[in-house]
Image: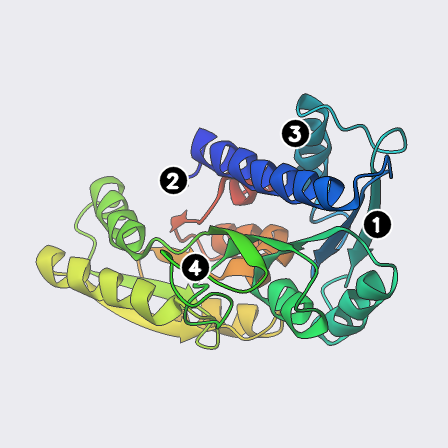
């Protein structure tokens, strides 16, 4: 199950608009016909980002930009190795790209650390204020703009949906990442909804891919009857394994995006 649909595409369109604005600003400042260069930074692998890469290229095309023709894109992927993302961000700065598009918190943090002058367009940042990316929504300041996926109220709604499809739901496992900004707010909303519904939530921290099997084992041992997944980048990188574990454990699951469903969830 997922709550994401055309909304995700709409938000991605807004991010592209921010990229276009940054490119236009750079072009106006240079007042020369220089082919703009975009740096695309992700902590995930190429395969994990395939659909977003396609959407990014398509969106740029709709705005009149074609890779290799009137725009250059420097693609940098950490291949699910967070320790590499800082060096990749520094590399984009050395290449003097005109704007950096960062996917998720880790990439945005690395880009922020690497430059205070190159415009950064963040996508899917979980909590940009708590993460220190911007000062406030009204007055962000600095060189970062973009989109946040933080929507804690939806986390409570996910539990409500599970309660509708799982008869007499009484226990639910909640897979989250405690180090992720915004995770605490999401959990709070789940707990509020759980009290209303008479459901007992069990929070299971997943810090990396190795924790997944242990989390599902703990959920099964605790007799959980369903799973809520709110793992951000870790979930995206391991969505196929997540889906397989949910099926193997015979646990109905609700996810953050349609990508989990496409992976078999």
Task: First in sequence, mark 1 or 3: give its number.
Answer: 3
Q: Residue at 68% of width from left, 36% of height from top?
A: 56
Give the distance between the C-alpha atoms of the residues marked 1 and 4, in whole angstroms: 30 Å
Which residue sits at x=72%, y=56%? 41
Where is mark 2, residue-wise? 3
Label 1, label 3: how far apart the Cα atoms are: 16 Å
Q: Is residue 223 visible?
A: no
> Percent position (x, y) of residue 92?
81, 61
Which residue is labeled 4 in the image?
Answer: 230
Q: Are marks 3 and 2 in contact (CB under 8 Å)?
A: no
Q: Earlier in the sequence, mark 3 or mark 2?
A: 2
Question: How many residues crowd mark 3 within 10 Å: few (<14), some (14–19), many (20+)?
Answer: many
Which residue is nearer to you in this view: 255 or 180?
180
- Secondary structure of the residue carrying tag 2 is loop
For marks 1 and 2 on the same chain, the one whose residue lies earlier in the sequence: 2
The quarter of the rendered structure image containing the N terminus is: top left
Residue 193 found in image quarter? bottom left
Q: Which residue is mark 1?
A: 74
- Residue assigned mark 3: 59
143 relative to 114 in the view: left or right: left
Residue 165 appears at what percent x and percent y? 26, 40
Badge 2 or badge 4: first in the primary sequence: 2
- Asked whether 165 or 157 is in front, the reply is 157
Which residue is located at x 54 percent, y 50 percent? 243
User: Given this view, does label 1 or label 4 mark the residue nearer the observer?
Assistant: 1
């Amino acid at each position: 199950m997922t709550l994401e649909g055309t909304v995700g595409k709409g938000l991605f369109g807004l991010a592209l608009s921010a990229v276009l604005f940054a490119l236009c600003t750079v072009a106006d400042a240079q007042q020369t016909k220089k082919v703009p260069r975009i740096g695309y930074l992700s902590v995930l692998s190429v395969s994990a980002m395939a659909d977003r890469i396609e959407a990014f290229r398509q969106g740029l095309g709709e705005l009149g930009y074609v890779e290799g023709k009137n725009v250059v894109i420097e693609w940098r992927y950490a291949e699910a190795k967070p320790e590499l993302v800082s060096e990749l961000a520094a590399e984009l700065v050395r290449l003097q790209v005109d704007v950096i598009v960062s996917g998720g918190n880790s990439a945005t943090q690395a880009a922020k650390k690497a430059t205070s002058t190159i415009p950064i367009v963040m996508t899917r940042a979980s909590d940009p204020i708590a993460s220190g990316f911007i000062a406030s929504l009204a007055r962000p300041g600095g060189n970062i703009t973009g989109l946040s996926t933080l929507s804690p109220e939806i986390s409570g709604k996910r539990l409500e949906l599970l309660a509708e499809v799982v008869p007499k739901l009484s226990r639910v496992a909640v897979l989250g990442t405690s180090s992720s900004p915004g995770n605490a707010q999401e959990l709070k909303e789940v707990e509020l909804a759980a009290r209303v519904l008479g459901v007992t939530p069990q929070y299971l921290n997943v810090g990396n891919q190795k924790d997944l099997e242990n989390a599902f084992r703990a959920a099964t041992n605790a007799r959980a009857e369903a799973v809520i997944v709110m793992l951000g980048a870790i979930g995206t990188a391991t969505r196929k394994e997540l889906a397989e574990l949910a099926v193997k454990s015979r646990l109905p699951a609700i996810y953050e995006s349609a990508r989990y469903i496409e992976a078999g969830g």
